Image (tube, rainbow, N blue to C red):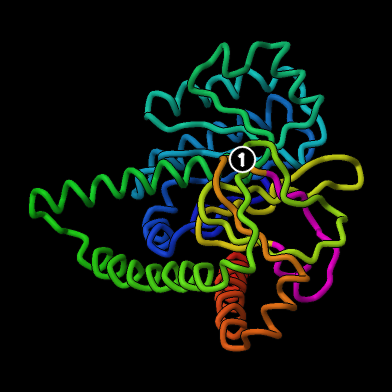
Amino acid sequence: MNQNLDGTKLRSNKDRSITDQRIHDYTGEQSIILQLQGFIFFGTANSLYEKVKIMVATDDKTIQFIIIDMKLVQSMDSSAIKSFEKLLYHLDKKTITLFLVNLSSEVSTLFKTNKFTHKHHSPLNIFPSLDEALELCEDKMILDEKQRIQQSHITGKNSENKLFQAAYHDMIAALDVQILFETVVDNIRQYLEKLTVNEKDFLYNQGDESSDLFFIESGQIALIKIESDGRKSRVRTLGPWSITGELGSFLGYHSSYDAMIVKKGIVYKLSAAQRVKLETQNPLLTTDLHKLVIQMLGNQLLKTSRMTDT
């Protein structure tokens, strides 16, 4: 086992509201990420089983998810399958969900040959990337906590006063950002082009000489990086009240990612020509636009800094 982290130290690249980020601060320990490396045979797989068994037996945080990242696994012997089956069965009895991610083609074929798949074992979840598994776990933990908070409010048992207070202040901060976004978009609407985007559409592609700035009003967009060997990795997921294309628009960079629509919605485009026109005709609105971009970049930098520190 190369590394053992929990969800507070390793997070998905999905952009979340400030309130959801705060809730995840309180619930992230419910997911555990184990990173494996090297050659996996019966002995190492059985050792993994025993370590996880002890981990969940002594857990005081109520673990909900175990994610095993196999990106650094070079090869695996078929004798290891039995230990993975034992691990899955043990976790399922404790209502802990198991994820396997970043499987090589060799390991994936081995699992399929031995019928160790979601089709044959419904509690098993296999994802192509760690980011996708993290996002699903976070979504579930945040939703469960929101429902618990709502139920506590109904029954009058607000036991997590610190969380309630923090969430309240975060909601106010998030509302300020949303209001700033909507105000800027509304005020510069005459310079914007409204786009109705559908799933699998692209706003721009990796390598494009991008100079457009996009404001996401609704829907969801994935920023996907294509590696030199053709592999694709999701770098970030953007939702409503966020922007993309800012580095190309302001610094003239070529796009580093594909921007693919994963949920249909409404996006507004500010072209380079229209931005120059805006800057010439209305300096005050331009200042508001720059303030919004700085706010968005600052939030992203803070998130990146937190992940680097942990």
Q: Residue at x 63, y 32 (%)?
A: 127
Q: Residue at x 61, y 38 (%)?
A: 68
**232 or 276, which is in the foreground?**
276
Q: Is residue 122 placed above or below 95 in the rendered structure?
A: above
Q: Residue furthest bottom?
A: 283
Is residue 40 in sight in this rendering?
yes
Q: Is residue 15 placed above or below 136 in the rendered structure?
A: below
Q: The residue under label 1 is which amino acid type?
A: Val
Q: Residue furthest right?
A: 228
- Please give left or right for residue 178 compared with residue 158 in the image: right
Q: Is residue 108 placed above or below 212 in the rendered structure?
A: above
**179 or 103, which is in the foreground?**
179
Residue at the disc numbered 1: 262
Measured from the top left, where is residue 164 in percent x and y? 24, 64
Q: Secondary structure at mark 1?
A: strand
User: Is 246 one of the magenta-colored residues?
Assistant: yes
Measured from the top left, where is residue 81 in percent x and y? 66, 19
Measured from the top left, where is residue 170 in percent x and y? 35, 69
User: Is 132 one of the magenta-colored residues?
Assistant: no
Is residue 310 in sight in this rendering?
no
**146 or 260, which is in the foreground?**
260
Measured from the top left, where is residue 198 in percent x and y? 62, 38
Residue 163 image-quadrant placement: bottom left
Q: Which residues are magenta?
A: 245-260
